[in-house]
Structure formats: C-alpha cells, structure tokens
Image (cartoon, grey):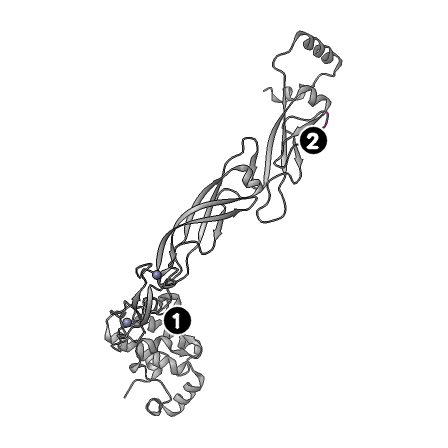
C-alpha cells in the first residue's frame, strides 16, 4: 500500500495547519535539491513531500483527501503530480498564495540562486566612490564642483544589450538546459541568458558598456561635513545585460578653518581681550562666517566665559537653520608695561579691594 500524505509528512491525521507546515519545512529542508545536488533519491523525496504538502495545506483538498482516501484521491486527478514536474514548474508552484520562495526564502533564498543564473534581471552596476576636499568657506556657503570621472557607461548605441538579440533556440529562452530534469543547469548555448546576440553592437563590441571620461557638475550643499556622502544617481558603472548603472558617491573632507573650531553645526572662536577691556567692558569686533559683528563684552567678564552668537554657526545640512557661534573670552595680561602705566596700575590697585584668596588657601593647605 502506498504511503499516505500524513505518513510522508510525519504528522498525525489531526495535525493543525501549522504543525503540517512546520513538519514540511523541516523535512523539505533536509531533502531540498540545493543541499543534495545530483541526488535523485533526495529529489524524489523532496517532490513527494511537496506534493503531500500541496494537498494537506489546502483545507478543501485535505477534506476531500480525508473523505475518499489516498488511492481514490490520487487517481481522481484532483491532487498534484509533483514527480512529473521539472524545476520551472516547481519554482512557479503556488501553495495557496505561498510560493517556494516564501517557504524557503529564509534558508535557501528559495530557488533564487538558480534563477539568478538563468533569466533573472542582472543587478544594478557597481557604485563609484570619489573623495574630494572642501575648503571651509565652501562648506559654509555651498558650492558647485566640477570633476572628470572615469566610468563604464551603458553603451548608447545598444543600450547595454550588446547588440540585436534573438531568443536562444537551444533553450527557447528559458536559460536552462532543457533536459526536463529538476536539477537543470544553465543553458550552455546562451550561458543562461536565454538570448543570443545575432548582430553584435559595433560601438561596444557586444560588451554593453563603453569606458568614458565624463565631466560632471556636483552641487555641494551648505553645511557639508567630514564623511558626508553625496549621491549622484546613475553615474556609476553600467550593469550587466543592460541593467541600470550604479551611483556615484562623493565623499567629502572639509579642510579645517584656522580660526573656527567646528562641532557639528556649532562653531567656537577664541578671542583675546586685555585686562582693561575685561575690567571696563568693551565692544568686541568678532568675525563670523557671515561677516564681522560687534559683541558687547560686559565689565567683569571672566576668562573662559562663553558668549553665544545665535545662528552664526554652520548651516545645518539640507535644513534652513544654522548652528551657533560661541565666543570664548581669554583675558590676556600685558607682558610689558611702561613705567608710567605701571605707576597708574599700582595706584589703581591701591584704590581697589584686594582679592580674597584666604578660603582656598585654608582649604588647600594640608
Ligand atoms: Zn553597444
Ligand atoms: Zn539558451
């Protein structure tokens, strides 16, 4: 007596849909053609499991199968005959909305490893990465760069096809050797492409791409930073068999400013003031990337104090806002004084309250 589908899938007659699926996936994984290449017995077992699963995963078919029994069901023509299926049929089989791809995609890539060798569309061409150094001022204002890049562009004459093509007569365009076997290999006549060039393109000699040196203008947006990547779509290398071109990526390095220290979109500048300015307060001329501004320094400002100039920092990339500019005050004592100034300062010192350091001296003396 022939094995019934429940036995084949190693489940009980009362198994739930989930239990059946789980068991099928486990067993099919063991006998999957990708893990048993060239093994006819495994192939048959895989087909047997798939046929059983095709019936038991369909509630209507399962009901019919249960009521009339294995023999009657399989001879009624309401089931499936997986043993007669070849690779293509299997690949296209649909388990009530679930394909082999969905069932095995997570551990075998479905059957995709084979299909990509056959007629599946070739992937996009490779990307090109180009590094440029951007002066600080250009990073502030944004600019346009012109560069010459070497790349393999899609052949304009044949649009990447390599020439006039016709369907391969050996495989009738399937790209697979048509010996009907489940383990069909790519067609030798067309290397699995399913097509043959009958009139080779003269411009690219059938390669489908031409090496060019292209002049490209690139917009560098304001606010660009180190390792920013600008993508220029379709300016990479041509793909195979007329597939789209990859992209060009411009990687930027911003040259440091001699005066501004950058931290994201904020900038910092150190400004020296003398003791008179610190004591009396002053109006300080501060450079910013957008022109000099006057900044009020209050009398009694501390050394290291940070004053903020809102919105005078770097532009934030692709946003219409700016970071801030921080002015760090550094009080500089005079190094050389004339006798006159010394006298005046001593006089002023006598009139000023003495700085009280007793507390820190007491606390710090051990
Ligand atoms: Zn061409
Ligand atoms: Zn062929």
How far apart marks 1 and 2 lie (CA) works out to 67 Å
Q: Secondary structure at mark 1?
A: helix
Residue 140 pos. (x, y %): 57, 40
Residue 224 pos. (x, y %): 53, 44
In terms of depth relative to the viewer, which is nearer, 136 or 323?
A: 136
Magenta: main secondary structure: strand
In terms of depth relative to the viewer, which is nearer, 308 or 3?
A: 308
Verify whether residue 298 appears in magenta.
Answer: yes
- Discs 1/2, front: 2
Q: Quadrant of the N terminus?
A: bottom left
Q: Are marks 1 and 2 in contact (CB under 8 Å)?
A: no
Residue at image coords 46%, 49%: 216
Q: Which residue is mark 2?
A: 295
Q: Which region of the structure is painted magenta?
A: 295-299
Residue 181 pos. (x, y %): 26, 76
Whether 244 is drawn above or below 63: the answer is: above
Whether 333 is drawn above or below 119: the answer is: above
Quadrant of ligand 2 in image: bottom left
Q: Residue 238 falls in which quadrant of the image?
A: bottom left
Q: Which residue is mark 1?
A: 101
């Amino acid at each position: 007596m022939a094995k019934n589908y429940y036995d084949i899938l190693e489940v009980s007659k009362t198994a739930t849909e989930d239990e059946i699926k789980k068991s099928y996936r486990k067993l099919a994984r063991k006998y999957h053609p990708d893990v048993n290449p060239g093994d006819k017995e495994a192939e048959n077992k895989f087909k047997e499991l798939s046929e059983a699963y095709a019936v038991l995963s369909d509630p209507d078919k399962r009901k019919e199968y249960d009521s009339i029994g294995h023999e009657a069901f399989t001879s009624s023509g309401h089931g499936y005959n997986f043993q007669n299926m070849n690779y293509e049929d299997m690949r296209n089989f649909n388990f009530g909305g679930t394909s082999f791809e969905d069932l095995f995609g997570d551990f075998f890539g479905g059957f995709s490893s084979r299909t990509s060798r056959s007629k599946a569309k070739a992937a996009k061409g490779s990307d090109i990465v180009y590094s440029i150094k951007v002066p600080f001022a250009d990073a502030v204002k944004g600019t346009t760069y012109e560069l010459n890049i070497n790349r393999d562009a899609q052949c304009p004459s044949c649009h990447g096809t390599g020439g006039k093509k016709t369907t391969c007569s050996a495989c009738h365009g399937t790209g697979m050797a048509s010996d009907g076997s489940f383990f069909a290999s790519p067609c030798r006549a067309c290397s699995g492409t399913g097509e043959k060039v009958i009139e080779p393109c003269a411009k690219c000699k059938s390669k489908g791409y031409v090496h060019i040196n292209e002049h490209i203008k690139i917009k560098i947006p304001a606010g660009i930073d180190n390792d920013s990547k600008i993508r220029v779509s379709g300016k990479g290398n041509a793909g195979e068999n007329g597939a789209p071109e990859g992209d060009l990526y411009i990687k930027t390095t911003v040259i440091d400013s001699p005066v501004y220290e950058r931290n994201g979109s904020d900038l910092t500048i150190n400004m020296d003031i003398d003791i008179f300015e610190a004591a009396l307060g002053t109006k300080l001329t501060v450079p910013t990337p957008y022109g000099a501004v006057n900044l009020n320094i209050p009398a009694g400002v501390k050394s290291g104090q940070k004053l903020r100039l809102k919105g005078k920092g770097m532009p934030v990339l692709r946003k219409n806002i700016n970071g801030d500019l921080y002015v760090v005050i550094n009080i500089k004592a005079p190094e050389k004084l004339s006798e006159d100034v010394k006298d005046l300062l001593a006089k002023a010192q006598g009139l000023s309250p003495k700085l009280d350091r007793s507390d820190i001296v007491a606390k710090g003396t051990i």
